Amino acid sequence: MDYHEAADVLTGLQQRRPKLGVETTARMLAHLDNPHASIDCVQIAGSNGKGSTARMLEQILDDAGLRVGLFTSPGLNDFREQIRVEGRTIAKKHVSKYVERLVPCLETLRADNDEPTHFEALTAVSLAHFAAMDVDIAILEVGIGGRYDATSAVDPIASAVTSVSLEHTELLGETVDVIARDKAQVAPSEAPLITGTTGDALAAIREETDVITVGNDSDSEADIIATETGIPSPIESAVSIVGSEWAVETHLPLVGAHQATNAGVAATLARQVQDVSIDTIETGLRGATWPGRFELMSHSPRVVLDGSHNPGATATLGSLLERYEYDELHVVFAAMQDKDHEAMIQSLPSITTAYATEPAVERAETAETLAPILQMNAKTVETIQSVPEATEEAIETAGARSDDLVLVTGSLYAVAEARDRWTRLLVPVNRSSSIDIGVGKESDNAVSERVNPGYAEAMFETDKADVTTQCFRTTLRPAQVEIFADHVAAAGGFCHQTTVGSPQKLTAIVFGGTTRDLMTLSDSLVDAGHGLRHVGSQLQRQLTETTPVSVSGLNDTRTAVMGILNITPDSFYDGGEYNSVDAAMDQANTMIDAGVDILDVGGESTRPGAEPVPISEEIDRIVPVIEALSNLEVPISIDTRKAAVADAALSAGADIVNDVSGFDDPEMPFVVAEHDAELVLMHSLSAPVDPDRRATYDDVVTDVMNELTEQLLRAERAGIQRDQIIVDPGCGFGKSPAESFELVDRIDEFEALGCPVLVGHSRKSMLATMNQPDDERLSATIAVTTLAADRGADVVRVHDAGENAAAVRAAAAAKHPYRAEDDTTEIDAETEADDR
């Protein structure tokens, strides 16, 4: 079964049905050989906060070294987002496998007039996947209620109810205490239920089961006190969690007093299911991010996306907004039909401009219905059906450098559509080489440097923009597709679209044309509506701007060479050779003379099986060397995954932090931002490399770019500018040799991220099968350096400076032969004779 067929099976199922209970889910699980029987499961229910709590628990247990499965709802763009193992979305081929097994059962259920809902079937698929991936713990976010939810087909070892408010009253009951009793049915049979509820809800839950309560410092009877103690930055809360015999102090990227309570629930769950250290809880909580939950997307203007979708959540959001200073508030608001819209809107602060809108969901309330309700709390109300367009209008109204705040809220579906603005990539593909010809027409695009011999006698009345073709791929919302295609056609380009294999709520697009066609297209999209003006801006940047070269050591004429200087006894190639300051200085000068542009100093090996180095020891290794190197004329990079080491290195004179873990230490982006330093951000599954940890990629380039996009947003949120960042796709770090070579071959596609790109391949195991005797993979390294430089890599990170610098120069000469000729030095007679 192909993936698109499997996806059609799942998305074709009904969303809701009158039958309640877990019987149908149990029948599907039995058909799949009861995969849940071999899994330890944790259930998390609640009106609000259950997704955030599940994500925090996942991060804590992952940091504790467990293999964790996570099932949440809804997905922002694709149901596959709802099923994750070790933080990675389920691969398409796995979905196909499980659905193919499930189809006969679905046919039987239909014959019995018992067709499951999409959520019930997805629950069964998730548990089958978790069993197949041999997870240690599966965390299940309850869909609705507790008693009759599909996830209640499992027998959990631990469970929580985060909060209870009036929601889904037609299914769960008309009062808080009735709803609380329903949710309490997720309680495990052999452990107390953990809950952050209060008042009538807590009283009702106590009547159903034993509990461990989590409350704030005003709740003297709570078993666990979880308190927000400060706001160290606009994107973090300081939290304190205190139990009878343990305490946690950390920062939390999910901000607000309510998230402190959720963190308390997550920490208590973690201690209940595993002997997790305090340090691990603190690090895990600080590393837990969750898209669309008071998520800061930009600073100028400040834009926040928050999926609060009921009165209780928007009341919490309103309180949270009170702590931020802003001039005017611009709100993009959408909601589902079954919500109390008036209560939601009235719980927000006074709104300057409101945009009533609606996401592309059947249950969405119309913008026309929401507009008069918004007038009760807004000075001005505009009705714009398209969420992306409403978001663009709000941002334009706020102004690029204003002190206004833009908020998108009311529904996670609306947040998902607005979030496209920051996550959509315009990826260059199949760029054809332009015909380099003599040009008879003066133009900024004229090509005069090199004349193709085949056209040497001809002078064409044209310019490069008319003959150079470019092609891009991206994804758009269904409502955007036809409008975009019409604009492409009007500009003279071509556009192809498909939903086969694309994310559930998005359409894959490939479009192209001559450079002039595409410039016309980018101009026309300004007034196209549906948020397409931002796509036009992205396209214009791709056509007119080169990759930023403001990072130290980079230039716009050739690939830069980053030379590796390991101050370690156990690195896989040169460990122990440069441990003293004098030896390191000698090697650094040798590399600079050989053509190195950046020196990368490392005090801890990340080779497979390497033992972690204590922070103090790593600092002692690298600081004296960096202090000595800081007087050299090339920038210094510190290769570390520890924020404390990076801080010491930057204070000692380093310019760049090369983080091979991709923010495994959640303090790292803040350290880099505080020093106004530059960053190499690498895609990695584990550091040091764990040879047993591999991911299943649908398309390694697309998957790595999407994951790097989220990390880039995290870096920018902390205050690092994108033009200060180099991205590294991470050859060899959790990728097979074939996947690593595909990353190198398609390295030009990473231009879509708007950052310089580094390739780190030197002497790695990806080259093992092409090694020569006594060569230690040097020849293959040089070959890949040449290939990477030709494909457009901005930096190569290598051990052997001279050989690789020569390869880079050769690749540059092939692209600019006359420039290479100009740079050629005179050859003395003896050298010329030797050459003969």
Image (cartoon, helix red, strand yellow):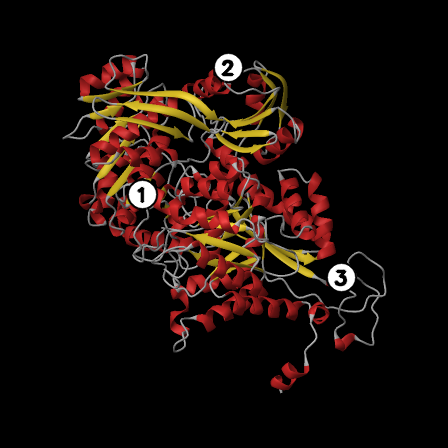
CA–CA distance in space, label 2 to label 1: 37 Å
Q: Is residue 61 left or right of residue 155?
A: right
Mark 3, residues whose alpha carbon is within 10 Å: few (<14), some, or many (≥20)?
many
Count of marks, rendered view: 3
**Which mark is first along the chain, 1 or 2?**
1
Say whether marks 2 and 3 touch (CB < 8 Å).
Answer: no
On the question of residue 741 being in view, the answer is yes
Q: Residue at x 62, y 38 (%)?
A: 531
Q: Which residue is mark 2?
A: 346
Q: Tag 1: residue type?
A: Ala
In the rendered image, the vertical position of residue 5 relative to residue 216, given as above or below: below
**Front disc: 1 or 3:** 3
Q: Secondary structure at mark 1?
A: helix
- Between 464 and 758, the residue placed more toward the observer is 758
Q: Tag 3: residue type?
A: Lys
CA–CA distance in space, label 2 to label 3: 57 Å
Mark 2, residues whose alpha carbon is within 10 Å: few (<14), some, or many (≥20)?
some
Tell me where residue 553 appears, x and y as whole percent: 59, 53
- Between 791 and 148, the residue placed more toward the observer is 791
Residue 265 quadrant: top left
Tell me where residue 339 appears, x and y as whole percent: 44, 22
On the question of residue 110 being in view, the answer is no
Residue 464: which numbered mark, if any?
3
Q: Which residue is mark 1?
A: 121
Quadrant occupied by the C terminus? bottom right
